[in-house]
Image: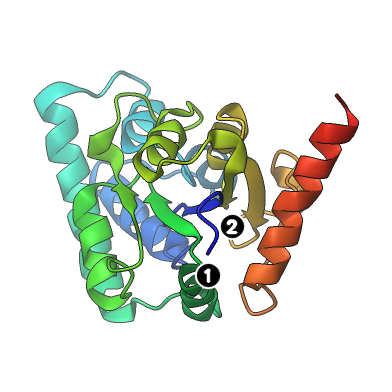
Amino acid sequence: MNSEIAVIFDMDGVICHTNPYHSLAFREFFASHQLFPTEEEFAQHMFGKSNSYILSHFFKRAIKGEEFKQMEEEKESLFRKLYGPHISPIAGIMDFINELHQNGVKLGIATSAPVANLNLILTKVALRDKVGSILASEDVKKHKPDPEVYLKSAANLGVKPENCIVFEDSYSGVSAALNAGMQVAGVLTSHTATELPPCGLYLKDYTELSYGKILNFQQARFRSAQKNR
């Protein structure tokens, strides 16, 4: 059993490849408001960002209060309608999580998505009984790239930040984990490695990952820290 390591997963683009459906939902939402972002704008200002940031950026004004709640629900309802029939975990993640769980690794989910989206995905991706901390947008005051969600996850799991490994797919998400002092594995579902801050390892799916590789990943950091003292 290894209680000194925690592995924390973002959700969109990390547990499930939801981003194409978020793009469709946002396009439909923005079109209804006479806005038509380019692919480049979507890549820079949507993936991994909070809805508060996305809406304020594309409407070019602060969207908050009741207006924000209404707009967020409008867009996220579209996403849940579009993605609901297609929920599927990224290849290899269930076997990987089961192996981590069997070896006593503490597990968490930390997403910028609203809890309704998280609940939808967890109805089809059976992780609740293996995950010790689940945090969504409503659970934090500051969103990625602020480290709050990851520091709170570490506290919930009872593990020091330096003993946490985070799986992330977006620039802001990787930045949040690095800002928390954690190791990061970059999941290349939405961006290339060069589009992300430097990560300790990169992967397109989880089919080649194992508990042993994660343990080696963590121990390599520990050895490096000891060497640099």
Q: Residue at horizontal 51%, vertical 30%? A: 145
- Residue 4 is situated, as x and y percent measured from the top left of the image, at 55, 49
Depth check, front residue: 221 or 87 = 221
Q: Tell me how far mark 1 sits from mark 2, CA to CA.
A: 30 Å
Name the image quarter holding residue 131.
bottom left
| Coloration of the structure image | rainbow
Left or right of residue 37, residue 208 in this image:
right
Q: Is label 1 in contact with label 2 (beta carbons under 8 Å)?
A: no
Depth check, front residue: 138 or 31 = 138
Q: Residue at horizontal 51%, vertical 81%? A: 95
Q: Residue at horizontal 34%, vertical 40%? A: 156
Can you identify the residue that label 2 sits on?
190
- 49 is higher (above) or lower (below) than 191: above
- Residue 25 is situated, as x and y percent measured from the top left of the image, at 31, 57
Q: Nearer the viewer, mark 1 or mark 2?
A: 1
Depth check, front residue: 87 or 46 = 87
Can you identify the residue that label 1 sits on?
103
Q: Quadrant of the C terminus?
A: top right
Q: Amino acid at mark 2?
A: Ser
Name the image quarter holding residue 66.
top left
Q: Amino acid at mark 1?
A: Asn
- Residue 33 is situated, as x and y percent measured from the top left of the image, at 25, 41
Depth check, front residue: 226 or 172 = 226
